Image (cartoon, coloured by chain):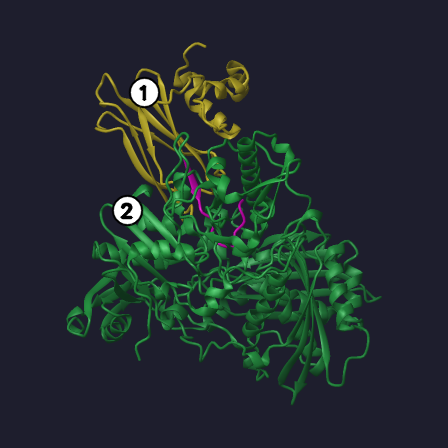
Amino acid sequence: MEPCTSDDVVRLNRRAMLQRLGTTGVLVALWPARAWTMSEAVQQAMHQRIGTRTPQPHGMTLRLPPLAETGNSVPLTVAVDSAMTPDDHVLRIHVFVEGNPEPVAATYHLGRRAGKAVISTQMRLARSQTVLALAEMHDGSVRSVTADIVVTLGACVEES
Amino acid sequence: MRTDTPTINRRSFIIGTAAVSGGLALGLRIPLGGEVAHAQDSAPEVTAWVVIRPDDTVVVRIARSEMGQGTLTGLAQMVAEELECDWAKVTTEYPTPGESVKRKRVWGDFSTGGSRGIRTSHDYVRKGGATARTMLIQAAADAWGVPASECKAANSVITHQPSGRTVTYGKVASAAAKLTPPADVVLKDPQDWKLIGKPLKRLDTINKLTGAQVYGADLKLPGMLNATIKDCPVFGGKVKSFETTKVQGMPGVRHVLQVGDSAVAVVADTWWQAKTALDALPVVWDEGPNAMVSSATIAELLQTGLGADQAFVANQNGDVKTAMAGATKQVDAVYAYPFLNHAPMEPMNATARYTAERCEVWTPTQNGEAAFAATMEASGLPADKCEVYKIHIGGGFGRRGAAHDYVTQAVLIAKQIPGTPVKLLWSREEDMTHGRYHPVTQCRLVGAFDASNNLTGLHMRISGQSILSAVRPEALQQGRDPLVFQGLNPSGEFALGYSVPNLLIDHAMRNTHVPPGFWRGVNINQNAIYLECFIDELAHAAGQDALEFRRKLMSKHPKHLAVLNAVAERAGWGTPAPQGVYRGLAQMMSFNSYVAACAEISVIDGNKVKVHRIVGATDPGYAVNPAQIERQIAGSFVYGLSALFMQECTVKDGRIVQENFHTFDSMRIAQMPKVESIIMPSGGFWGGIGEPTICVAAPAVLNAFFNATGRRIRSFPLKHHGIQLV
């Protein structure tokens, strides 16, 4: 598949996007061998942002506690292994949350003065899920990392 | 008088209590490659669920928490059923949440609430037992060099049927543990059950009777100090200042600490020294904006919701407005239900020890994983540096499930005195005033009749507090709290048992600063009173018998109707009651079980109520331990009737007023009615036991009270109306 710039992404509508991708199954097959299937909502949101580029699972970490007492406010840190120089830097970090009503939690744009490619925040998570982070690099490549979190059920609340 | 509390060092404590059924978790080594996982006493783990000792003792791992509801025994019964072991040799232990995280939650959910313990784990715990049995048989077969299909297991003994050779589980457990677990196992047909469905004695009763049971308050660790705490009396307020110098010289006082931004604790050699010093400590609170809130201002707030235009809808069909407009007769009533405290016999407590390398907590909790998450957050340490050890609970009822404020506090205290274990135990007053309260609501119900006295419309408007808004806002559905409508939904586990041609059930959310929580039964307590008392009002207005009136609305709800008919028949509804005895009915579906009750009461001098008998029926799909179900039914009636007659938490100057049992009483044995239980599992689904029955006693008694006196009571508790339970 030919490389896709972010300008191209903006211009393509969803139908054209899926046509360029072929079956959605292809992207999942390229995913690292772990028992996780990306939800359709996350797939779509991901394509809208990185087009047809294939993320590679390396060079970044996602720190999330394995358990949260409630999903109300969960600390999260994404760190990308990059010197943040003109020759090697991160353009954007995306965080996807498949178990939330909205699949995209945040996109961080890192400018020239961002000395480190590290973001920390607090997120609201609706339920136990796999969180996905992507890093768009200066050379058009995309890195990825995932982490699982269990949001413990308070007594008397059913799993939604 | 000095009371003797067990003094044990940490290591022997952990091993010792493992021998006491349901005691603390043992450390486990994780299996790597072919290595076998062992419990701390070296007995091999056949599967994560089952450890078998050489003497054939079976240790069943239980993730859920026992709090008197019998789930520990019920789950063990289910594992043992498939395991085909000798029940007399079964004991249990709690795996720790830390091990659960390391082993990718091999024991599933730890959360114990929502009457879910049995019904959401029965499948996988039975599979855990069946898998272990299959491996044990295979190990014996391998040792004998025979096909496993020729071997059969029963009572912890494997027999090779053609030759008659036998071997006990204890002898093959190690070999079994090395085998690869089968990918799939077939579970027994319910009609072949030998343990499930039997009224077996509980595994935890003996220790509770002899005093051997260790509770949080009994815990003693080497070098441990004792702490007690005061959080700002007004919810949402903060600590401004406190004068340590005034108490630091008092006997035994070691530390006076701020905990978070809203609490102050004293740490001393003994609990009483800590409490005495804390009571003497001058504290200035910044009470915040909620200091002006009172029960009166809350009631005004709720009233605005009764007629409000905006409300969240749960259940509607037809057109209620038109039905009301065209009604020949309308019945209109407003009910109100107060805040309640769980008031467990054991106040909130947790023991914590913190260093930069490790944070450990010992606590009674309904959810070991939530306690673990709270420990990680409060300590700031990652999962592999934290651990929580579950202790048996002295009363949960929902208080110890969703909120782990006491764990957070204990860790924050321990963090300020690294290396020293500290037991934080709340006073009764702190427990009563810093609960997670049954939410406050009012309800306006309007019923419409046509000229033939048929019910044509029903509007039920609930106005009041949402639990999820405070506890789990991410679970709201576009702002709506689905839990408000328990027992009133069109379908599902909390489905309404009536069909009305024009129906509207909605909720005007009115939240208060009083922190809400899940009180046993949650919202079915008030929903059953609102609905079942109003249905009786409608029956009365139509001049119809309360049972007949209901039956007409229940033809599409056969399971709701079945339990109602069962109690009516057993109680003799429709036949004359003894002189001075009056009956009342109620039914509701919740937590996937169908329940009903018929109460028989007498009223003396118009205001002294004697409840003679309550006939209760439940259809929970399957009944794992009928003896335990009977006790849960009776126990739930104690909780529900105590609330009805005697209990409420009121608010003055932003604070909860009721501080102890003299103003928040509960019923006594002499007041307890005879309870007859009809357990009628119809099969094909799994319903809960711990909560569903709690909601039907109160409306049944209230309906009987109307039949006895002609007085309809719509606000609670009854003591405010001069009505006593005798």
Kindly identify the amino acid type of the residue bearing the numbered disc 1.
Met
Give the drawing colour for chain A.
yellow
Magenta: main secondary structure: loop
| Rendered-image quadrant of the N terminus of chain A | top left
Q: Which residue is mark 2?
A: B380
Give the drawing colour for chain B.
green
Helix, strand or loop at disc 1? Answer: strand
Judging depth in this view, the residue of B363 and B701 nearest the camera is B363
What subunit carries mark 1?
A: A
- Mark 2–mark 1 distance (CA, rounded to whole Å): 32 Å
Residue lying at the far top in this picture: please name it.
A2
Question: Would you place residue B597 above or below residue B374 in this image?
Answer: below
Specify start and end residues of the magenta stretch as a single range: A148-160
Residue B347: image location, x then y, percent: 39, 67
Magenta residue check for B79: no
Residue B672 sits in quarter: bottom right
Residue B616 sits in quarter: bottom right
Mark 2 surroundings: few (<14), some (14-19) or many (≥20) residues within 10 A = some
Residue A35: image location, x then y, percent: 48, 28
Residue B402: image location, x then y, percent: 44, 55
Mark seen at residue B568? none
Magenta residue check for A154: yes
What subunit carries mark 2?
A: B
Kindly identify the amino acid type of the residue bearing the numbered disc 2.
Gly
Q: Which residue is mark 1?
A: A137
